[in-house]
Image (cartoon, grey):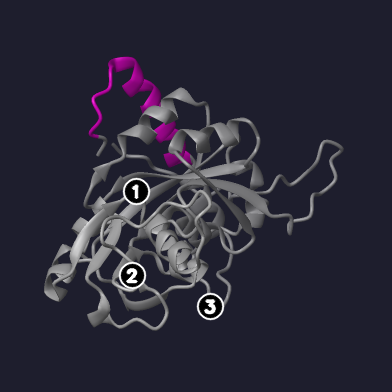
Amino acid sequence: MIKANLGPRSRKALSRKLMQSLLISASIVLHFCSQPIAAGRRTGDSINASNLMHNTNKKGGSIPSDVPIRVAYQGEPGAYSEKSTRELLGANVIAVGYPNFEACYRAVTAMECDYACVPVENSLGGSIHENYDLMLRYDLTIVAEHDFRVRHCFLVKPGMKREDVKYAISHSQALAQCDGYLRGLGITPVPTYDTAGSAKMIANTFNGVTDGARALPGKCTPENTAAIASDLAGEIFGLDSLDKGIEDDDSNFTRFLLLGRKGVVEHLTKKISSKARLDIQF
């Protein structure tokens, strides 16, 4: 449900984009349902990034499918937006982090990136109103959507034990989602600007990186502080994960939209059977 307060024109414009998303999603489903399912793979698994590449160049020749696409996301390396991007598109993608959501839209519009992967709704936190506003401002197409399961990890400097941790740093929403876990361990939550950014701050501090790096807040040190972030952030910044899935509610999902300058239907190489029928109900 969209909770933003929009005027009649804005609601109409957004409704057109959401209807566009529905039709594109239906086309994807019909496309995959018309093909046999490969062994070990289920219909509805991640979209192969090569299927999103332009199939022909200006002269009509094919473009190699192994050319990686560039996808913009908001946040530091290892952010949940990057993890969602890789879960949706697979390994053959270059994920490019930007400082804010609008920068992602601009990157696609300016052809710096092929697509942007942005969150629009969280099952616990509600709608991300900013991205609905930006969808109205920028003329991008909704290519696909992905419901991403958020799993928080307890990340620490290598060699630390759980009993060494006095503070936990992360985005305020992530801390709130792990409140029961932290209370049970007597750990004090300290909010920061970003989940993956918190992992980066711990890694930068014990690695001696100071040039342009954010400092750990207050009494936090790499020896007494854990970051709550994704397992991908832990891998990128060289942190140990002492615990996974520490969120209090296991129904924590975020819906992401993949936005591009063109739709995905042009990339579907198989013809959809003329016998297929699509019923849309409201």
Residue at position x 59%, y 50% in the image = 272
Whether residue 102 appears in this view of the structure is yes
- The amino acid sitting under disc 3 is Gly
Name the disc covering residue 193, or none: 1
Residue 42: x and y in percent read: 49, 69
Residue at position x 18%, y 69% in the image = 187
The answer to which of marks 1 and 2 sits earlier in the sequence is 2
Q: Is 8 part of what is drawn in magenta?
A: yes
Which quadrant: the N terminus? Answer: top left
Which quadrant: the C terminus? Answer: top left
The answer to which of marks 3 and 1 sits earlier in the sequence is 3
Whether residue 141 appears in this view of the structure is no
| In this view, the mark in front (1 or 2) | 1
Q: Which residues are magenta?
A: 3-23
In the depicted structure, whether residue 225 falls above or below residue 1? below
Residue at position x 34%, y 16% in the image = 9
Name the disc covering residue 40, or none: 3
Left or right: 103 as drawn, with respect to 248: right
Residue at position x 64%, y 61% in the image = 92
Q: Which residue is mark 2?
A: 153
In the image shown, does 255 or 214 lie closer to the viewer?
A: 214
In the depicted structure, whether residue 123 falls above or below residue 150? above
Name the disc covering residue 136, or none: none
In the image shown, does 215 or 86 lie closer to the viewer?
A: 215
- The amino acid sitting under disc 1 is Tyr
The answer to which of marks 3 and 2 sits earlier in the sequence is 3
